[in-house]
Amino acid sequence: MDPDVDGVRVRGALASLRRYVRLRAAAVRERCELCGAELAAEHSHLIEPATRRLACTCEACAILFRERSTVRYRRVPRRVRYLADFRLTDAVWDGLGIPIDLAFFLHTTPAEGIIAVYPSPAGATESLVSSEAWEVLAAENPMLRDLEPDVEAILVNRVGGARESYRVGIDECYKLVGVIRTKWRGLSGGQDVWDEIGLFFAGLKERSS
């Protein structure tokens, strides 16, 4: 068997494989759910408050919903803010009734109140927060009264002794839910998921304004 011919065949097979991979990657690229335009890796989101479903959109479509609150969708803000002065004692945290040390809080118009959402291996779990417990927290942190309903949340990380709080778009919170759901292994999660959680919050702090 001619080694030069074999080499040509191998190179040809590899070239075909690379073309296939590029085509597959192009085929699975996300597209705007409103107009069908191809999306960049970092793109805007809309949320449907009634179902809390997120929709990926291009900037041209997202901007149409910037100031409109009575339509089906609302635009999710892309800003991230690390709340270095956020006041949350252990006693107040316990009063919120969250069973784990990781949760986010938002005002939802369908429920007409504040809900807490915490991630789990099965996805997001929701629970109502009593108005009394929330008022205690808001009294210490008046900015909580300015949260944009449905699209903005306070994300709290107290895992492993951490004491971090962020004001973020709701899409960042569900991104964290997805990380935990896909990376969790066994009863304790495994080291990979905790490493990913650490990287997630490090990325938020880096992007914080």
Image (cartoon, grey):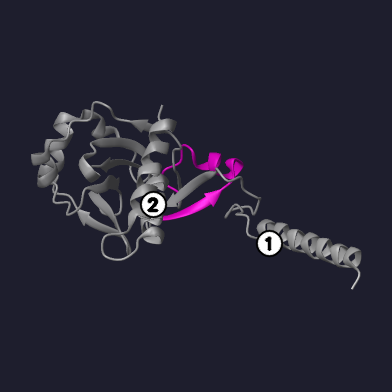
Left or right of 165? Residue 62 is: right
Classify 180 as above or below 206: below
Q: Amino acid at mark 2?
A: Tyr
Total count of labels? 2
Q: Quadrant of the C terminus?
A: top left
Image x and y of residue 75, in percent? 46, 43
198 over 190 or under it: above or below: above
Residue 72 location (% of width, % of height) = 45, 52
Q: Is residue 107 left or right of residue 51?
A: left
The label shown at residue 174 is: 2
Looking at the image, can residue 39 be seen?
A: yes
Quadrant for the N terminus in the image: bottom right
Q: Which residues are magenta?
A: 53-71
Q: Residue at x 15, y 36 (%)?
A: 137
Query: Is any part of residue 113 visible from this angle?
Result: no
Amino acid type of the residue that numbered disc 1 sits on in the rendered structure: Arg
Q: Quadrant of residue 80?
A: top left
Residue that badge 1 annotates: 24
